[in-house]
Image (cartoon, rainbow, N blue to C red):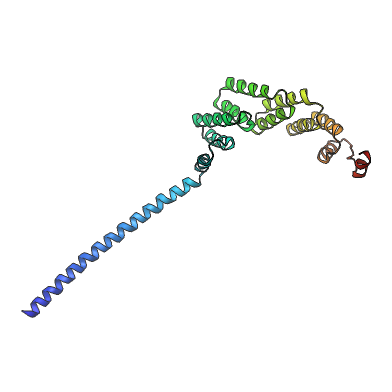
Amino acid sequence: MGGHDSTKMKVILIFFAIVLLGFALLFLGGCREAENRGLNTGGATIKAAEGPEAQLLTELNRKFENPDTHCKLGRLYHTQENWDKAEYHYNVALGFDPAHRPTQAAQVRMFVDKGDMAKAEQFASNYKNQVSASPRESISLGQEFEKEQLDEYALACYQQAIRVGSHLAEVNRQVGYYYLRCGDKTKAKEYLQRSFELNPNQSDVAGQLGRLGVAVQVPRKSEQNLSR
């Protein structure tokens, strides 16, 4: 009897051991699957957090009134052709800084890309009029239009800058370099020469004029000191 009971007890213990092992394997498998799911989800979350949109939104959470961040986010949605979000962030940027030239130019570019040329013309004209009394601000807006490959609007700003600031060397310099980028060497030479006449202490302009076949000479330091 004792031997039979002992055998029976061993069988029961083995059975329970097998059952417990099965539960342990199921538990470990479930944990591993959950872990894998967590890693996958975590990876996606990390990836999203490192993405441009999430980074910019995080920046806005820290400082919502930053026009630069709104402009960058607007550009991001702009490239995705998410026009409503792009326009919203451009408008918010200009709400915080009505003279934010990069946003002004980007907004006009958005209307062009949407095919709404009437609005593009209207907004470009409004922004150009805003800076009509300032040659430097006209240049600044023109440069932003140029970055957006809106050469027609850029040229209008540069021409406006010359009308009110032809006496400024930096204005003539910027306009000269614009024509140089456009491949119009005759006009580039004209404005760069004018710039150099107004301020001969521009070695880069002197060098560019030399490449255009115009012989100029930058004043030597000793000569500058004597003139003072």
Please tell me which residue is depicted at 63% across the width and 21% down the height of the picture.
126
Q: Which image quarter holds the C terminus?
A: top right
Tell whether 192 sits left or right of 122.
right
Quarter of the image where one finds residue 9:
bottom left
Q: Percent from the top left, x then y, of residue 112? A: 58, 26
* In the depicted structure, whether residue 21 falls above or below residue 83: below
Nearer-the-camera pick, 162 or 225: 225
* In the depicted structure, whether residue 124 falls above or below residue 208: above
Quarter of the image where one finds residue 106:
top right
Quarter of the image where one finds residue 162:
top right
* In the depicted structure, whether residue 121 falls above or below residue 105: above
* In the depicted structure, whether residue 186 falls above or below residue 10: above
Tell whether 68 sits left or right of 41.
right
Nearer-the-camera pick, 14 or 195: 195
Q: Which image quarter holds the N terminus?
A: bottom left
Please tell me which residue is depicted at 30% across the width and 59% down the height of the picture.
29
Q: Percent from the top left, x then y, of residue 155? A: 71, 26
